[in-house]
């Protein structure tokens, strides 16, 4: 039986669709409300991913952007933040050498520094905007780090959004600070929210949302954090990006 309250999904359209289908199949009401899209960025001319000892990915989108840019990992070892990121790498045929279940990039970087020692050259493929903490933690530990911006996140145009984002009692799922910013730019409402990790939760708190943080960065944990029963969700979603 469908739940009375709805989950508002705010990721990009393609990934929203995956979660919407899973939730609907499980009898959990949801609203497909994509708030962001991705724009590809040109590659720097001096880039050679094979010159790095590690490639550390912090999101499934970072992996997809890396693959879409026709880049190769060479002999570098690969690290992934979260089960979805690791699953995206493995689905593309890559082995994952470092796969901690951490909530955010800072914790991911700290655990890397505990597990591995410099010197090592690290490449961070991902968005053009990211939190400063992971790079600061890695460089502070003695690693050589280079960020590789592969895409930018762009909010969906306001003209394409509804007048009201949700009904009373609905809960908004945020999976990145960019979705929080897109929501606050479009509406004054501050409904209850679930954040996929602490970085996103911080953005929610700063914007005035009452927020709960998922224990792990996946749909099942977010449903549980919303106070709903995730047991009817497909088990494969534990590794869905």
Image (cartoon, helix red, strand yellow):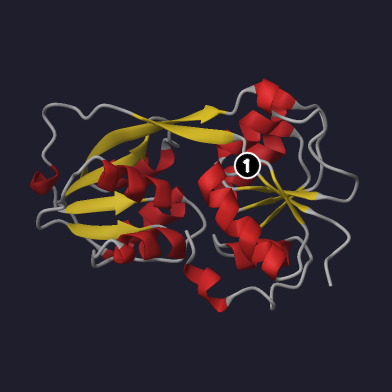
- Taking depth in this image into account, of 82 and 84 the one nearest to the observer is 84
**Residue 137 visible in the current orientation:** no
Residue 12 % position (x, y): 54, 42
Residue 190 % position (x, y): 80, 36
Which residue is rendered at x = 60% and y = 58% of the image? 19
> Which quadrant is home to the N terminus?
bottom right
- Snapshot quadrant of residue 212: bottom right
37 to 216, vertically: above or below: above
- For disc 1, the marked residue is 202
Which residue is rendered at x = 31% and y = 28% of the image? 41
Residue 46 is left or right of residue 87, and the answer is left
Give the secondary structure at mark 1: helix
- Taking depth in this image into account, of 200 and 175 the one nearest to the observer is 175
Residue 159 is left or right of residue 171, and the answer is left
Which residue is rendered at x = 40% and y = 56% of the image? 108
Mark 1: give few (<14), some (14-19) or many (20+) Cα within 10 Å.
some
**Residue 177 visible in the current orientation:** yes
37 to 49, vertically: above or below: above
- Taking depth in this image into account, of 146 and 119 the one nearest to the observer is 146
Number of dots carrying numbers: 1
Which residue is rendered at x = 79% and y = 65% of the image? 227
196 to 206, vertically: above or below: below
Residue 152 % position (x, y): 42, 30
């Amino acid at each position: 039986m469908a739940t009375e309250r709805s989950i508002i999904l705010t990721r990009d359209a393609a990934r929203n669709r995956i979660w919407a289908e899973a939730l609907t199949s499980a009898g959990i009401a949801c609203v497909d409300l994509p708030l962001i899209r991705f724009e590809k960025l040109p590659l720097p001319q001096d880039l050679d991913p094979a010159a790095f000892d590690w490639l550390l990915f912090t999101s499934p989108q970072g992996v997809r952007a890396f693959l879409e840019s026709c880049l190769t990992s060479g002999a570098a070892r690969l690290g992934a933040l979260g089960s979805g990121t690791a699953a995206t790498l493995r689905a593309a045929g890559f082995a994952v050498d470092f796969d901690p279940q951490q909530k955010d990039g800072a914790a991911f970087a700290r655990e890397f520094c505990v597990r591995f020692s410099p010197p090592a050259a690290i490449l961070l493929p991902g968005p053009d905007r990211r939190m400063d903490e992971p790079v600061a933690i890695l460089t502070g530990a003695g690693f050589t780090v280079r960020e590789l911006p592969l895409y930018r996140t762009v909010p969906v145009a306001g003209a394409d959004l509804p007048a009201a984002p949700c009904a009373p009692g609905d809960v908004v799922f945020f999976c990145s600070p960019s979705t929080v910013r897109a929501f606050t730019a479009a509406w004054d409402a501050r409904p209850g929210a679930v954040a996929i990790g602490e970085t996103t939760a911080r953005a929610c708190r700063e914007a005035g949302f009452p927020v709960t943080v998922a224990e792990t960065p996946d749909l099942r944990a977010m449903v549980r954090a919303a106070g709903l029963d995730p047991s009817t969700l497909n088990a494969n979603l534990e590794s869905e990006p």
